[in-house]
Image: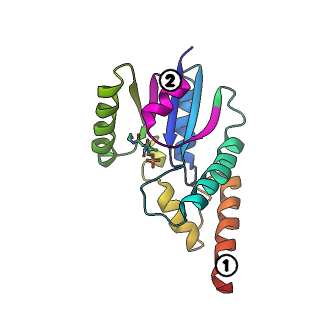
Amino acid sequence: MRTAIYPGSFDPVTYGHIDIIKRSAKMVDKLIIGVLSNSSKTPLFSVEERVNILEKATKDMLKEVTKDIPNVEVTSFAGLLIDFADACNAKIIVRGLRAVTDFEYELQWAQANRAVRPHLDTLFLVTNVEYSYLSSSAVRELARYHGDVSLFVPPYVEQKLDEKLDSKENEHEQN
Ligand code: PNS
């Protein structure tokens, strides 16, 4: 049984991620998407809030958009990627590469992970050129200023983004 993990922040999931999910799911028996719940990125929310949001909103979004891909599972993880890979009994880590700028960072971690887990290979898929410029942070920024994100995320994700940003705006107005 060939199991791969596809880890990431998925905050939110974009068409770029979905493209990688669809393509990599065809290459393996089981693809486990791991949503990182602890992140070193500048937090917009507290740790608890972020865990809840990532586990609920992102997981829901991923579940919705991957429901037609039978060998894909979604879960969250905290801590090290190699430990998550061990827990999943996975020997493959899937990552998407958009541009040279991604490569340096990805190469470093792929090498480090392989140094401690020699059986663990990172499989890089080159992002569809259509999505080479796409990032979750750009989607968040666009949505924050009411830009049209329909080219970048599925309608369900767009709806979730609107709900999230509306509730944040309401919160702001009340304070
Ligand atoms: O979607 P992202 O933010 O580019 O994903 C980054 C991710 C989740 C792959 C990376 O931050 C990660 O695996 N973090 C867990 C801690 C860890 O093991 N870091 C080193 C390996 S990349």
Q: Quadrant of ligand 1?
A: top left
Would you call the spot at circle 1 few (<14 residues within 10 Å), some (14-19), or many (20 or more)? few
Q: Amino acid at mark 2?
A: Ala
Tell me which amino acid carries mark 1: Glu
Magenta segment, which residues?
73-95
| Residue 74 within the segment the image draws in magenta | yes
Q: Is residue 143 above or below residue 33?
A: below
Residue 59's x, y, as percent?
65, 46
Q: Which residue is depicted at the point 57% across and 47% down?
A: 15
Left or right side of 53 for 7: left
Q: Which mark is residue 90?
A: 2
Judged from the image, the secondary structure of the residue bearing numbered disc 1 is: helix
Q: Which residue sits at x=64%, y=73%?
A: 168
Q: Position of residue 39 (x, y in %)?
A: 46, 53
Q: Quadrant of the C terminus?
A: bottom right
Residue 120 located left or right of residue 34: left
Picture coordinates of residue 78, whole percent (x, y): 51, 43
Q: Is residue 58 magenta?
A: no
Q: Measuring 34% from the left and 31% from the top, which residue is drawn there? A: 113
Mark nearer the N terminus (1 vs 2):
2
Tell me, for residue 171, which label it has, or none.
1
Judge by depth and name the residue closer to the eye, 129 or 113: 113
Q: Nearer the viewer, residue 135 or 88?
A: 88
Q: Is the CB of mark 2 within 8 Å of ligand 1?
A: no
Residue 154's spot in the image, x, y percent? 65, 51
As helix, strand or loop, the secondary structure at mark 2 comes to loop
